Image (cartoon, rainbow, N blue to C red):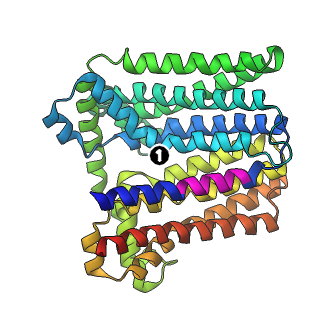
Amino acid sequence: MALIKKTSLLRDSLLVIITIVVGTSWIYDLQIEERVIAVRYLILASAGFISFVTPYLLFPDSNSKLIQLGNISDSELLNYLSGKTSKIYKFFYLFIFVMMFADVSSPAGSLVIKLVYSLYAMLMVAGLHYTALFLYLKVGPQSQFWQESQKGQELRRKVAEYAKYPIDPGAIPSLLNTVLLAALGMSLLVIATLLGNSFGHFAELTIGFLLIAFGRYKFFRGSKHPEKRYYHTNSFFSEFFGESAGEDSITARRKVEQLWWVPSKLRANVWQFLQQTDRKLPAGRVVAAGHILVWLVAYQRPDDQFMIGVWALFAVTHHLFILQAVQTSFSPMWLLRWMSSPMVWLFSWFWMQMRWLLPLTVSMNAQLFIFGVPGWRYQGIVLSIYLITALAVSAAGVFRLKKSMT
């Protein structure tokens, strides 16, 4: 237990340092108007992230049997679900604070505006968080209906026949929730920006208060019989992800020999980590969604330095997959110690991340061709940050492994 707490503290400390360094290096010399614009873009990115990743953070829940045995109350269950996801979003709040107050040119200037927009952005993220919890908690019955009903089977047949694309009807409610949440966040951001430009920043702050009030009310007061919805939704997602061993899944088709970018001595290790992480969270879809968000930001034609900061931040967030892979449920420490030395696992986790280098490079060069940024020099900086942080996060996993030996 003490080891787990130390590991969690080390991981959180590393993420805090990365968040502060990336945020400070990104906007340390921006004027207050540029900081406000940067925070608005961050809210836009947060809306996309929260709408996509929330169900994967919640379900399937490995603690469901303990919750059932404990027979916890409705309020305790809701607080548990909120706390489980808040562990991720706390770094958004820190990044927002750093973006507004890491000001080298005028650290004591425009303090009221900095405070208002820090609070505004945090309220928007928190409001979207609670709204996402409410929507995804009740998705189980809806997904089961589409999965098992004649209506869902007919949709599967039509999409396969006309679009030549296989679709799982059970994923439709989650897809609709993703679109709804992203659209809600973006629409409210536009409304708040218009109000802020017309009536001042306190009018913009009002939208944040309204959103978090709505989200908390719907989640804590509007979730009727949350225990039934929780067990139903958790059972559906457990079954849904349990079917990933089917012939159509990428994990079933992936072979060790296909990992051409990995040294032969590490391929079996990397293959196993990829199988485990992709069964829990479809990494390809997550990264693709991240690229879409980055391109949406680029379409707005922000400052070049801001765009480079977006790419650097996106590059670093790839390494959340390493943190996922070093969890005890994925990588039991006793098994890793028995199979290989710590250095082998260091390079296994590091090489696991090399699969994203080509998409990063291609996407940045495509953006360079269309928007003129990031240039090759800055691309080199982004890729260097990617490689250095991949090694640092992998080293944190090795540190945890070595601590378990003592």
Q: Is residue 385 left or right of residue 142?
A: right
> Whole-percent x and y of residue 92?
58, 42
367 vs 4, nearest the viewer: 4
Relative to 279, is 255 above or below?
Answer: below
Q: Is residue 32 above or below residue 350?
A: above
Identify the secondary structure beneath mark 1. loop
Among the 4 quarters of the image, the one containing residue 390: bottom right
Return the x and y of residue 163 as percentages of the image width and height: 49, 41
Residue in the image at 75% along x and 52% along y: 26
Magenta range: 15-24
- Report whether 211 appears left or right of 303: left
- How many numbered discs, if any? 1
- Mark 1, residues whose alpha carbon is within 10 Å: few (<14), some, or many (≥20)? few
Task: Specify the principal SS of the magenta part.
Answer: helix
Is 16 colored magenta in this rendering?
Answer: yes
For the question of whether residue 19 can be seen, the reply is: yes
The vertical placement of 304 against 173, above or below, is below
Q: In the rendered image, is residue 156 in sight? A: no
Q: Position of residue 383 (x, y in %)?
A: 68, 67
Magenta stretch holds residue 61: no
Q: Looking at the picture, does residue 38 appear above or below residue 190?
A: below
Residue plotted at (35% across, 71% down): 403
Q: Quadrant of residue 117?
A: top right
**Residue drawn at the location 54% of the way across and 55% of the way down:** 15
- Amino acid identity at mark 1: Lys
Q: Quadrant of the image for the C terminus?
A: bottom left
View extreme (left): residue? 69
Look at mark 1 in the image and give the residue it sits on.
Answer: 164
Of residues 304 and 163, which is closer to you in this image? Answer: 304
Displayed quadrant of residue 297: top right
Q: Quadrant of the N terminus?
A: bottom left
The residue shown at (52%, 60%) is 319
